Image: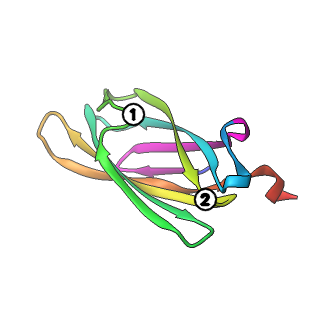
Amino acid sequence: MPTATTNDIRVHVETQYQEEQSEPLNDLYLFAYHISIQNNSEHIIQLMRRHWYIFDSNGEAREVEGEGVVGVQPILRPGDTHTYISACNLRSDMGKMSGTYLFERLENGEQFEVTIPEFTLLVPVRMN
């Protein structure tokens, strides 16, 4: 699964199609994504914002931006890992996501972006 490291912050993504909550006859496909963020830096950092780019294979593109992730702005000490699960709906059975997190170093208030690697959202039958 996709992994990216920026400024010693490692982001790893795993995805899963949510068949039970999808309605293909109504062009609704739900995908869960599990994100692991590991602080391999020497600094205490806080995740302030997220910015997602979501592309659907039907040509639809959207951006989602906001504070934190799933309602929290986690603080990570050196060596800490924060994991969370969220979801994305598409109107087709294939798409992709990528984006950035905005972090802040708590000792000096310096902000920096961390890359969220591009990952594919794909209904398993498409792989046949």
Identify the residue at horizontal 26%, vertical 35% (top origin).
45
Residue 86 can be seen, yes or no: yes
Gap in angstroms between the C-alphas marked 2 and 1: 22 Å
Q: Report the magenta stretch's main SS.
A: strand
**Depth order, front residue of 77/116:** 116
| 5 left or right of 16 in image | left
- For numbered disc 1, what is the local secondary structure? loop
Q: Residue at x 56, y 44 (%)?
A: 13
For disc 1, the marked residue is 70
Provide the secondary structure element on which disc 2 rests.
loop
Instruction: Determine crowd level at label 1: few under 14, some 14-19, many 20+ residues with C-alpha closer than 10 A.
Output: few
Viewer-nearest residue: 125 or 111: 125
Q: Answer with mark 2 or mark 1, whichever residue precedes in sequence.
A: 1
Tell me residue 18's x, y (percent): 68, 39
In the picture provided, is 30 more to the left or to the right than 51? Answer: right
Query: Range of the magenta residues?
Result: 3-20
The location of residue 100, given as percent across then percent down, is 37, 54
Instruction: Give the image quarter of residue 94.
Output: bottom right
Residue type beneath disc 1: Val
Give the answer, above or below, for where 86 lies relative to 97: above
Determine whether label 2 and label 1 are within 8 Å by CB.
Answer: no
Magenta residue check for 128: no
The quadrant in which the C terminus is found is bottom right
Using the image as rendered, state which of residue 68 and residue 61 is in the foreground.
Answer: 61
Closer to us: mark 2 or mark 1? 2
**What residue lies at 62% left-to-right and 45% top-to-bottom?**
30
Report the residue marked by disc 2: 91
Residue 122 shows in the view? no
Q: In the image, residue 50 lies at what x, y percent?
A: 34, 48
Q: Quadrant for residue 14, please give it.
A: top right
Please state the horizontal and vertical placement of residue 78, each as a whole percent of the image: 34, 29
Q: Residue furthest bottom?
A: 59
